[in-house]
Image (cartoon, helix red, strand yellow):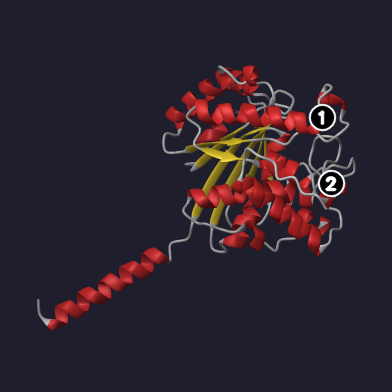
Amino acid sequence: MNMRLKLLSAVLCLFATATFAAEPLRVRVLSIGNSFSRDAFAYVPFLIEEFVPDAEVDFGILYIGGCSLERHYNNLVGEKPDYEFDYYKAGAGKWSIEKGVTLQQGVEREDWDIIILQQQSGRSRYFDTYQPYLNDLLEYLSQAKPRATTAWLMTQAYGTGYKNLDGMTSDEMWARVNASSQRAFEETSIKLLIPAGTAIQNARYTSLDRLGKAGHLVNDGFHLQEGIPALIEGLVTTQVILKHFGVDVDVEKSRLKITPEWREERRTPQPHGEPEEATDEEYILARRSAKWALESPWQLRVVEE
């Protein structure tokens, strides 16, 4: 090969490498869930964009309030148009909501990279309510979207004193949700774990426990208050998603702060109250609570302040 051809080959190689490097990260995630999905995921597209500014994020939440795995499966079989579809489209900068959607329509909307499942909050502590519906849904997803990776959302325990704790403490509920989630993760084809519930329980052992209209980071006893509580779960989810794409981020480096104006501009779905004012130190604790859960998803980090 003469010198001119060698130079041309080198230039073409550099051009191809530069073109490949310029490809933006494409992230397509679907959640099949309920209001706890909205708690965990409403801020996630914006957090992904904070860490990876040129990322193209499509995020869908198939929502029915209080929906269980059993009901999701029955809706699938009956092709029931009972869902609201919360949809964040790359470049939109805000969420939109479409009503009257079937589970199948949501699944077929995109070539999803990750599909997230969860159990209804009250049943999440009882593993015998998971099956056979979880395996049936996973089987459907493996056929409908064989390229997608399935993930599990470990939901948060109820706040201390909430009536539906059924005689348990908040820690006892977390321990049962934790054990059931561990079985779901280990005994099925699920590949990714989002330990959001552990992050919230970690935060309850810090001064962040003051937040929320009902205290304990919740607005009404079980839904997360807007602002720092929902941000904690969003940070956990963001790190799990980006790591799946080979992007390793440090959630403690996020500088996103949630205000009522920020939330309203982005039309985050089903807000529970409004974001409360918080100090820089409290945001540090929030990010740290998320990081602790990512490091030890099955164990609490008890902080004595």
Q: In which image quadrant can residue 215 be found?
A: top right
Sequence-first tag of 1 and 2: 1
Q: Which residue is mark 1?
A: 169
Element carrying mark 2: helix
Residue 125's place in the image compared with 198, above or below, is: above
| Residue lying at the far bottom of the rendered structure | 3
Q: Is residue 63 left or right of residue 146?
A: right
Q: In which image quadrant can residue 279 be found?
A: bottom right
The answer to whether the residue labelled 1 contacts the one labelled 2, judged by CB atoms less than 8 Å apart, is: no
Residue at position x 83%, y 25% in the image: 164
Residue 24's place in the image compared with 119, above or below, is: below
Q: Is residue 210 left or right of residue 158?
A: right
| Residue lying at the far front of the rendered structure | 304
Q: Residues within 10 Å of mark 2 (few under 14, many from 20)?
A: some
Q: Is residue 39 visible?
A: yes
User: x, y (%) of residue 23?
Assistant: 43, 62
Front residue of 277/166: it is 166
Q: CA distance from mark 1 to mark 2?
A: 15 Å
Residue at position x 80%, y 49% in the image: 304
User: x, y (%) of residue 150?
Assistant: 51, 35
Q: Which residue is mark 2?
A: 209
User: x, y (%) of residue 15?
Assistant: 32, 72
Q: Residues within 10 Å of mark 1 (few under 14, many from 20)?
A: some
Type of amino acid at the residue the image marks with label 1:
Thr
For the N terminus, the image quarter is: bottom left
Q: In which image quadrant can residue 263 be found?
A: bottom right
Residue at position x 70%, y 30% in the image: 175
Element carrying mark 1: loop
Front residue of 225/191: it is 191
Residue at position x 56%, y 52% in the image: 57
User: x, y (%) of residue 145?
Assistant: 45, 34
Type of amino acid at the residue the image marks with label 2:
Asp
